[in-house]
Amino acid sequence: MIRTEELTKTYALGEVSVEALRGVSVEIEAGELVAVVGASGSGKSTLMHILGCLDRPTNGKYFLSGKDVSELSSDEQARIRNKQIGFVFQSFNLLPRTPAVENVELPLLYNAEQLTRSERRDRALAALDSVGLSERAAHHPSQLSGGQQQRVAIARALMNDPSLLLADEPTGNLDTKTSVDIMTTLHALNEKQGLTIIIITHERVIAEYASRIIELSDGLITEDRPIEATTAPLAGV
Amino acid sequence: MLDAHALETALQSLRRYPLRTALALVGMAIGVAAVLVTVAIGTGAQSAIRNQLRAAGLNIIQVKAGNYRTKGDGGGGVLAPHAFLLWLDGWLAPTAHAHPENDPMEKHDHPTAADRLGDSKAGLGGAATLTQADADAIETLPGVANVAPGVHENIRAYAGERRWFTRFHGTDVDLPLIRRAHGIAHGRFFSQRELRRAEQVAVLGSVVRDKLFGEGADPVGETLTLWNQAFRIVGVTESTNWMTPGTVGDKAFDAVYVPFTTIHRLLNVTNLNTITVTTESAGEVSNIAKAISKLLRVRHAIPDTAPEDFTVTTQASEVLAKGLHPNVARVLVGNLPNLDRTTLQELSMTLERAARTMKALLAAIAAVSLVVGGIGITNIMLLSVTERTREIGLRMSVGARARDVGAQFFAEALTLALTGGLLGIVLGVLVSWALESSLGWTMELSLGGIALGFAVAMVIGLLSGVFPARRASALDPIQALRYE
């Protein structure tokens, strides 16, 4: 599903150049639920941006579904983000003053298929229903709780049936109970639909939901191990 | 660049910020309305001036048959009786004026022309030397707007028991176009068909109507008897200017108008007393008057040394003489033959120039307000790009290409400008209408002015959209997503 070869990323900050990634080679199979952990500045966000086709590596190769996507034009990258990747962000990133259902429709607007308005609406309502929010379709983000907002964001990420879901600190702004809800939802998506999910987090307990943990430190992978027990680790908290 | 989705997205976004959208629209609408209204005021003022000059008759040239000036008596002659003044005297003392001897009724209530004037040369002046062919030739001169042949008599008009001595004008259907001050109070002016068939139809001046049928009556359809002939009354003409109503003795409204062809038929003549010519602009009057003299000299085969058998007068000299004692007027006009050229024409040109300058000034002010409106839109869109950076990042993360984001912001600006422009046109029309009806200003809303306002709104929309759109589409998705 995902294969990277010696990914490096160097940012030039004035005179100084910062090496965010210094040769990351990793392979992730379809259907895996992977947690990427590491201290801040370890390069995990940079890795996610490259995996999410929001950024290009300075050097190295990135194969998504067997295709080298590290050299694509920004328009082609946009197309891959639209069709193959879903994003879930720490701060939800919903459009303000916009009903939940219109937020969920957003990826369809940039879909090459050019769906009609009612087709988009139907699919968005179905997606909201699948995250248990069909009754909140008309609510604006400010009228929803944090957990509900994040579920709207998940519904939006799933709109174009992506093969990869990237979640950047999805529970970072949520309380423990809501965090459990969100993680349970993501876990279920992985289990039942076989969706490949990569979660970036610095919370160990969240990482415990994954079947595999990759730890980054100073732009290098320092640990990559599978986890056996995938039963709700937070249940006892 | 713009597709249905970009427009839809733009509309959604504009709805999300109603106050901002409303402010941008108001700015644009006021700008466009200002352009419309000021152009309407300017154009209105210009045509008001032009109409006043026309109403004053400054663009009218009168060609009269005969010439009472004697040979060698140039423009500088102090006591030369100008043909116009003799004609004017005719109006001032109407009983002295005669209708021709070939009256079909052969019933003369006055001495013949020769007896009256006691001058054998009067035959030259009295001779109707102008013809319909002369009128047709004048019509082909450049700068000439209307040409109306005329035959003028004094007459006793009878309606039942009442009678009234008044002026009798045989004229053309174009007269209401020439005499701007003539309005139709009842009925209509006689038609081209009635003129062609020389029918016995008459249009009464308001004074004649008052005298024969009573103040303000509508005599249309009644019968008027002239020269013992029955004429059907088809209309009443009255002054359009309340400041100069028709009065007894004035030649415009104390008068009866009939087709000149009817007089030709009744008198069995083909000649004309006058040809009334209007020019397209008051500024050309002298040149066209000269051209008419030249044309008629050629047509009448008059050698350079001989005096003309016609007189060309401009209304300007008539205006000057108005209200003066005939002798004073005679001296004045006799001494200042070129007066119209030097003063009245310049006056008309100066007024037109002033109106044009005012129009340009107003348009410039309006243009400034439009530019301000446009900058307002640009400002709002730029602010929007900054404020909505995260939104842009998000849109990019779900698959929007740089050009999709650019198109959205461009479409937002264009939508604001065009909607604002349309609102502005509506507002401008309403304001113009309100100013016209409440203050009585002359407003002239032209399609051109509306098109101009809208075109400027378009251009401003395009310009004010391009810059923010470029800025939005140039954003890096990661930077945009992280923007706080």
Image (cartoon, coloured by chain):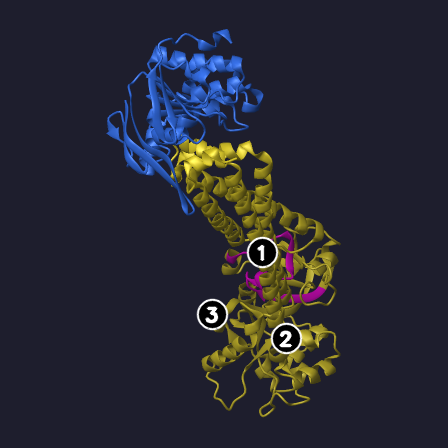
Chain colours: A blue, B yellow
Q: Is residue A50 left or right of residue B235?
A: left
> Percent x, y for residue A132?
47, 12
Q: Secondary structure at mark 3?
A: helix
Q: Amino acid at mark 3?
A: Asp
Foreground residue, B203 or B140?
B140
Up-down relation of residue A58 to residue B89 (above or below): above
Tell me the residue at 51%/20% (across/down).
A149
Up-down relation of residue B35 to residue B134 (above or below): above
Query: The residue marked by circle 1 belongs to what chain?
Result: B
Q: Distance between the Cα atoms at labels 1 and 3?
A: 50 Å
Q: Are labels 1 and 2 on one chain?
A: yes
Give the residues drawn in magenta, as a range.
B165-192
Residue behind mark 1: B368
Q: Distance between the Cα atoms at labels 1 and 2?
A: 36 Å
Q: Is residue B167 magenta?
A: yes
Query: The residue marked by circle 2 belongs to what chain?
Result: B
Residue behind mark 3: B136
Foreground residue, B50 or B123?
B50
* Pointers 3 and 2 in contact (C-beta within 8 Å): no
Residue behind mark 2: B344
Q: Amino acid at mark 1?
A: Val
Mark 2, other Cα within 10 Å: few <14 / some 14–19 / many ≥20? some
